[in-house]
Amino acid sequence: MDEPKRKKITDPKEALSKAEHYCAYQERAQQEVRDKLYEWGLWPDAVEQTISELISGGFLNEERFAKAYTLGKFRQKGWGKIKIKQGLKLKRVPEVLIKKAVALIDGDAYTATLTDILIKKARILPEKDRFKRRYKLQHYAASRGYESDIILDVLKDREL
C-alpha cells in the first residue's frame, strides 16, 4: 500500500507555527528541525529564517537540547559518555556544547550505573570460564558507551 502524499507547506508562517509546536513538544536539535522543515517542503531561505525565529523565540536552544539529551540517555537508558557523545555528534551538536553537556554527569553516579549494568549482565551470563566472562562483560559495557579504563576499574573492584 502506498502512503498518502503529505501536503507540502509553502507558507513560512504556517511552517513557523507548526515548527513551534514541534519544538515545544520536546527538546530538538537544530538539525532535526532543519530536516523536518525540508521534509515539509520549505525552501532553504525559508528554512533558515524559520530556524532563526525559533531560536530568538526560545523554542530552539542547542545547549538546552544537549543537556536534556545527555541526562536523559544516561538516566533512562544507562548510556556511557562515549555513546552519548556519538549520539550528539549525529545530531550535529557543536563539540563545545557536547563537552559541556557530558560534564554534567556525576562521576559517582556514572560508576554506580556502570556497576549496576555489569551486575545485571553478570547474573544472566551463562559463561563459567572467568576470563571469557570478564571479556564478555567488558565488551558489553563498551557497547553501552563506557570507557575501558572505568570498566576495568569496576571489574577489578568487584569479582563478577
Image: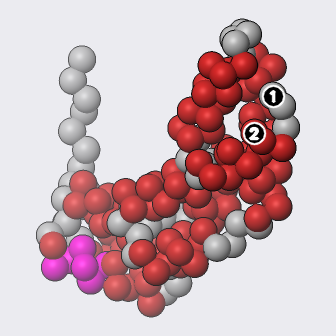
The residue indicated by pointer 2 is 155
Callout 2–callout 1 Cβ contact below 8 Å: yes
Residue 55 at x, y percent in the picture: 43, 84
Q: Is residue 78 rendered to the left or right of residue 57?
A: right
Residue 48 at x, y percent in the picture: 25, 79
Q: Which residue is at 24% across, 49% downward?
A: 7
Q: What quarter of the picture does the C terminus occupy?
A: top right
The residue indicated by pointer 1 is 160
Q: Is residue 25 rendered to the left or right of residue 52?
A: right
Q: Is residue 150 visible?
A: yes
Q: Which residue is at 16% across, 79% downward?
A: 45
Going by the numbered disc 2, the residue's amino acid type is Leu
Along the viewing direction, whichever of 55 and 118 lies nearer the viewer: 118
Q: Which mark is residue 91?
A: none
The residue tagged with tag 1: helix, strand or loop? loop
Q: Is residue 57 rendered to the left or right of residue 81?
A: left
Q: Which residues are magenta?
A: 45-50
Along the viewing direction, whichever of 51 and 127 lies nearer the viewer: 127
Along the viewing direction, whichever of 28 and 102 lies nearer the viewer: 102
Residue 133 at x, y percent in the picture: 68, 21
Total numbered labels = 2
Magenta stretch: includes residue 49? yes
Residue 150 at x, y percent in the picture: 68, 52
Q: Main secondary structure of the magenta part?
A: helix
Q: Is residue 38 rendered to the left or right of residue 23?
A: left
Q: Which residue is at 61% across, 27% downward?
A: 135
Going by the numbered disc 1, the residue's amino acid type is Leu
Q: Which residue is at 25% across, 29% downward?
A: 3
Mark with earlier residue (2, 1):
2
Mark 2 is surrounded, within 10 Å at the Cα level, by few (under 14), some (14 to 19) or many (20 or more) other residues, namely some
Q: Is residue 103 above or below residue 121?
A: below
